[in-house]
């Protein structure tokens, strides 16, 4: 064990398998603890880097690591990611047939697999191999699901206590992003790991810029925001299903590729929306909070809250889905009183109404803050930040206070004269001397302050009134039609000379940024070219683009421009396997970008290597094993070889009738190049590799 714990050993594994040079935060200590055989509890925010804490030990341990995970989508993503890194992993579930399941069980017995993912409901199927001879470590991902205190409670997680009984000497590592003490205690008790060492990381996600804006004209603000970020993926969270659809429609009308997502959609539709987003086929998803759990997509660049979330936990979890790769990300929240009122209505009558209202109140305070927002967020999670963060709107644009006593007196005096019976809108109408139906009906034009504020805009009055509410100088009577009422401070301001300090509304200077930002990612930049190459390969291999290389890795390639295999391996995120599989193509792209002045090193193209093996008589499966590439990739080589006129017996792999069917589809689909369209045309019944092979036959004939 001492040998395994050798620090250099760990560093080497980190680079070889994951391509990273340094551990993040407490990762190394956590991994050491697991390898020593101790139980471990890891609390780390979303995107903090939890997976490596059990995936890296798994590569070093003799047997198999059993990973309990709640969602199939999550498992699939992680398994794809591991295999892309050359680590053998699989998942086990009820959708697989008996022979598939047996094969997996065999590869556990022969210790061929390093990690096996399973949902608690399917654990029973693995009964026979739940033995210490086979299993060397157990990881419980999303461990908060065990607790009925938590927000994602899953009853089946509660039976997991039996694991410690059955495998008493196997270390358990439980991981979650939920921090509260009750949940933590529950996890430890139910998993029977009282001596687990706890690693609680900072919840600060420094790379996420925080911003709150008033909700005026939010649809247009959102459109402008997205247009500044042409190729960046993002999520717009909305309060209602209807909202998700109307916003999605508006965005599409403005040329932004958007889907709506909510619980009212069919299972198939939800799966499609999620997949297209993960595969970078749609740029934006407008969603209710149902969207996001189970999405590990590391290149979500921004999250917008069209409506205010009901508490800070939810808000933090949702914005945490952006910037997992550690690059700059944006969280933009729109704040409106209408939302607060709506959320109060939802909460009222709930069994824990008081708790819900108190949490909403904290959310509201965050939205209205005039001090560093990150300090407020982190203090909510019990963490104190010494300095202001410098990466929130308040830090970047500190509010300028002025003596607003006169404005305050005008507002408060109006509230008093309408006998504390009217809501904000009517108060402002009176101040501005509006003669609308309500005012005339109620004879409010006779009020003494009518029209005394007609030199100030509606927006400004609203901004001032909200600040008075925030500072406790008047209040909203939520149960009385949201009428504004005076407080004990009000009279001091009206009669005793108490001064009030206010800020002006901030003008959003988006236009200026637009040109600057647009220049940042010109469509012909190296980053864009690498991104397109990544997308092409992702389609070929049928895995999400970010699993090939994340954005941070592409950025580093753009900066360092590696031109040889050795240089390529120094890039963070490039491990041994990714160098072997993708190195040539990416290096070629970089060389090409840098112009033909630099001589390209002579190298054998990857499909030609496949050709040699093919000519020596190996089957596709054998070539795939030998080259450590997926079979679809080998088939794509075969397709290219055939198209290039090499000696390939294409009809060994595809029937004439399949070629004819694809030919027919090609005509009906107006010659589309998108394999996905063909796949859908055949109701997902024709494999991608067959479509590709058939197209190479057809294209060759048509050439
Ligand atoms: P979590 O499960 O905590 O939400 P992940 O394990 O998905 O987070 O990690 C988030 C991202 O950070 C992934 O893209 C991962 O590859 C990356 N990452 C993890 N550890 C490191 C590290 N030591 N150096 C650089 N990137 C890392
Ligand atoms: Zn700040």
Image (cartoon, rainbow, N blue to C red):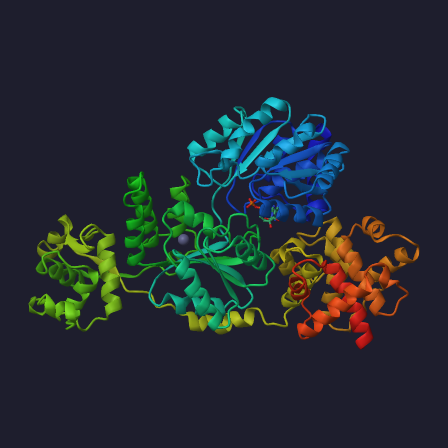
- The single residue placed furthest to the front in the displayed view is 657
In the image, residue 607 above or below residue 356:
below
- The single residue placed furthest to the bottom in the displayed view is 703
Residue 514 is situated, as x and y percent measured from the top left of the image, at 48, 72
> What's the residue at 36%, 49% (across, down)?
310
691 lies left or right of 322: right
Q: Which quadrant holds the N terminus?
A: top right
| Of residues 217 and 600, the one drawn nearer to the viewer in this rendering | 217
Residue 698: image quadrant is bottom right
Residue 641 is situated, as x and y percent measured from the top left of the image, at 84, 65
- Is residue 466 visible to us here? yes
- The single residue placed furthest to the right in the displayed view is 616
Count of picture labels:
0
| Of residues 221 and 387, the one drawn nearer to the viewer in this rendering | 221
609 lies left or right of 106: right
- Is residue 563 visible to us here? no
Residue 65: image quadrant is top right
| Of residues 696 and 373, the one drawn nearer to the viewer in this rendering | 696
497 lies left or right of 288: left
Q: Which quadrant holds the C terminus?
A: bottom right
In the image, residue 205 above or below residue 508:
above
> What's the residue at 40%, 61% (across, down)?
243
550 lies left or right of 506: right
Residue 272 is situated, as x and y percent measured from the top left of the image, at 57, 57
> What's the residue at 49%, 52% (across, down)?
291
């Amino acid at each position: 064990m001492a040998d395994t714990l050798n620090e250099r050993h760990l560093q080497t594994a980190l680079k070889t398998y994951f391509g990273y040079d340094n551990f993040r935060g407490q990762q190394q200590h956590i991994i050491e603890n697991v390898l020593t055989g101790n139980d471990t509890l890891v609390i780390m925010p979303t995107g903090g880097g939890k997976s490596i804490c059990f995936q890296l030990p798994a590569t070093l341990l003799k047997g198999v690591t059993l990973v309990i995970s709640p969602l199939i989508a999550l498992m699939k993503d992680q398994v794809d990611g591991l295999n892309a890194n050359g680590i053998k992993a699989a998942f086990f579930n009820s959708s697989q047939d008996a022979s598939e399941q047996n094969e997996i069980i065999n590869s556990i017995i022969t210790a061929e697999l390093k990690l096996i993912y399973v949902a608690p409901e399917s654990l029973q199927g693995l009964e026979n191999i739940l033995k210490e001879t086979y299993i060397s470590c157990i990881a419980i991902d999303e461990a908060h699901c065990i607790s009925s205190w938590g927000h994602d409670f899953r009853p089946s997680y509660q039976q997991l206590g039996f694991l410690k009984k059955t495998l008493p000497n196997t270390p358990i590592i439980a991981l979650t992003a939920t921090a509260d003490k009750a949940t933590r205690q529950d996890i430890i008790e139910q998993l029977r790991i009282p001596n687990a060492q706890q690693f609680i990381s900072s919840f600060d996600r420094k790379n996420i810029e925080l911003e709150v804006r008033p909700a005026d004209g939010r649809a247009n603000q959102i459109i402008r925001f997205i247009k500044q970020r042409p190729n960046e993926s993002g999520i717009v969270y909305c309060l209602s299903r209807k909202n998700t659809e109307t916003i999605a429609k508006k965005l599409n009308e403005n040329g932004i590729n958007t889907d709506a997502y909510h619980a009212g959609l069919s299972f198939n539709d939800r799966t499609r929306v999620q997949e297209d987003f993960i595969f970078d086929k749609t740029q934006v998803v407008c969603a209710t909070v149902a969207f996001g759990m189970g999405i590990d997509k590391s290149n979500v660049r921004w999250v917008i809250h069209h409506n205010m979330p009901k508490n800070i936990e939810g808000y933090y979890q949702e914005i945490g889905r952006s910037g997992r790769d550690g690059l700059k990300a944006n969280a933009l929240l729109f704040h409106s009183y209408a939302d607060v009122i709506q959320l109060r209505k939802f909460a009222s009558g709930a069994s824990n109404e008081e708790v819900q209202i108190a949490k909403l109140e904290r959310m509201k305070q965050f939205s209205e803050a005039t001090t560093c927002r990150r300090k407020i967020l982190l203090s909510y999670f019990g963490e104190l930040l010494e300095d202001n963060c410098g990466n929130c709107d308040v830090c970047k644009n500190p509010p300028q206070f002025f003596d607003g006593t006169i404005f305050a007196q005008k507002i408060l005096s109006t509230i008093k004269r309408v006998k504390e019976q009217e809501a904000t809108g009517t108060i402002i109408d009176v101040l501005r001397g509006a003669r609308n139906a309500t005012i005339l009906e109620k004879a409010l034009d006779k009020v003494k302050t009518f029209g005394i504020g007609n030199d100030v805009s509606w927006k400004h009055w609203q901004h001032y009134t909200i600040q008075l509410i925030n500072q406790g100088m008047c209040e909203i009577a939520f149960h009385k039609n949201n009428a504004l009422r005076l407080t004990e401070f009000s009279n001091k301001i009206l009669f005793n000379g108490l001064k009030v300090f206010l800020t002006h509304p901030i003008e959003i200077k988006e236009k200026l940024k637009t040109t600057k930002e647009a220049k940042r990612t010109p469509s012909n930049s190296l980053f864009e070219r690498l991104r397109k190459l990544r997308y092409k390969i992702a389609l070929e291999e049928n895995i999400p683009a970010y699993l090939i290389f994340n954005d941070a890795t592409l950025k580093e390639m753009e900066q360092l421009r590696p031109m040889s295999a050795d240089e390529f391996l120094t890039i963070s995120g490039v491990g041994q396997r990714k160098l072997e599989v993708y190195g040539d193509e990416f290096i070629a792209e970089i060389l090409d970008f840098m112009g033909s002045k630099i001589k390209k090193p002579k190298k054998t193209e990857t499909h030609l290597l496949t050709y040699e093996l093919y000519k020596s008589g190996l089957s596709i499966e054998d070539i795939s094993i030998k080259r450590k590439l997926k079979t679809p990739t080998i088939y794509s080589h075969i397709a290219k070889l055939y198209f290039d006129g090499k000696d390939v017996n294409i009809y060994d792999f595809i029937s004439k009738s399949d070629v004819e069917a694809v030919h027919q589809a090609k005509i009906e689909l107006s010659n589309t190049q998108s394999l996905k369209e063909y796949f859908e045309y055949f109701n997902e019944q024709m494999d991608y590799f067959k479509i590709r092979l058939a197209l190479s036959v057809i294209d060759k004939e048509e050439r």
